[in-house]
Image: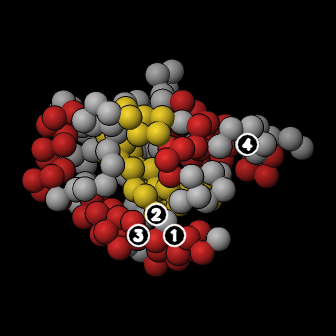
Amino acid sequence: MFSFFNKTNANYEQLAYEFNFKSIDGGEINLQQYKEKVIVVVNVASRCGFTPQYEDLQSLWTNYKDKDLVVIGVPTNNFKQEPGSNKDIKDFCETNFNISFPMTEKIDVLGNNAHPFFIWAKENHGKSAIPKWNFHKIIIGKNGKIADTFASITKPSSKRFIDLIEAEIKN
């Protein structure tokens, strides 16, 4: 039976590389510039119990950025834990976690105003691609398709997460 949310039925008429975000600094983050790299897209927030994962995300970025991986932080207030301005968010991340990976401006990841990337993720990977909370991770393989998603509780330093990243880098 056909299911719109069945991953096996994903037709991927668009790849992740077709999406752009506005950066936290006001510039552009064009995913096309990361073609043939593994991309980790994470919706983030400063006032969340999972906020310490910023440290793991920065370590992931530091350890793998020269091995075809990019981490992109996507601040959102959809879960009412990121009320600050883009400047507040950037200052918090730099001061508390020394974040150097790309960050988007604060956007919606859910609902009618969700960024098109998150709508695409849902359409092509099903309900598991929909963030249920902050620090939901979407892994884009080098082919521009979703390799997997990880719930907030999965740390970026976990064996399962790292194993997938390393396997995708080798592809």
Residue at 54%, 30% (x, y): give it.
Answer: 116
Nearer the observer, disc 4 or disc 2?
A: 2
Local secondary structure at mark 1: helix
In three-dimensional space, the C-alpha distance between marks 1 and 3, rounded to whole angstroms, equals: 13 Å
The number of numbered badges drawn on the structure is 4
Give the residue pinned by disc 1.
165
Q: Secondary structure at mark 3?
A: helix
Q: Nearer the viewer, mark 1 or mark 3?
A: 3
Mark 2 in CB contact with mark 1 (< 8 angstroms): yes
Q: Which residue is mark 3?
A: 66
Amino acid at dot 3: Asp
Q: Which residue corresponds to the image point at 28% horizontal and 63% vertical from the top-left?
A: 58
- Return the residue at label 4: 12
Callout 4, which amino acid? Tyr
* Residue 118 horizontal side relative to residue 21, left or right: right
Mark 4 burial class by Cα count in 10 Å: few <14, some 14-19, many 20+: some
Q: Secondary structure at mark 2?
A: strand
Q: What secondary structure is marked by label 4?
A: loop
**Amino acid type, residue under disc 1 in the picture:** Ile
Residue type for callout 2: Leu
Check contact, mark 1 vs mark 3: CB within 8 A: no
Vertical position of residue 21 compared to residue 97: above or below: above
Outermost residue to the front: 33
Residue lying farthest to the right in this orientation: 1
**Mark 4 vs mark 2, CA separation in Å:** 21 Å
36 left or right, relative to 62: right
Q: Which one is in front in this view, the residue at disc 2 or the one at disc 1? A: 2
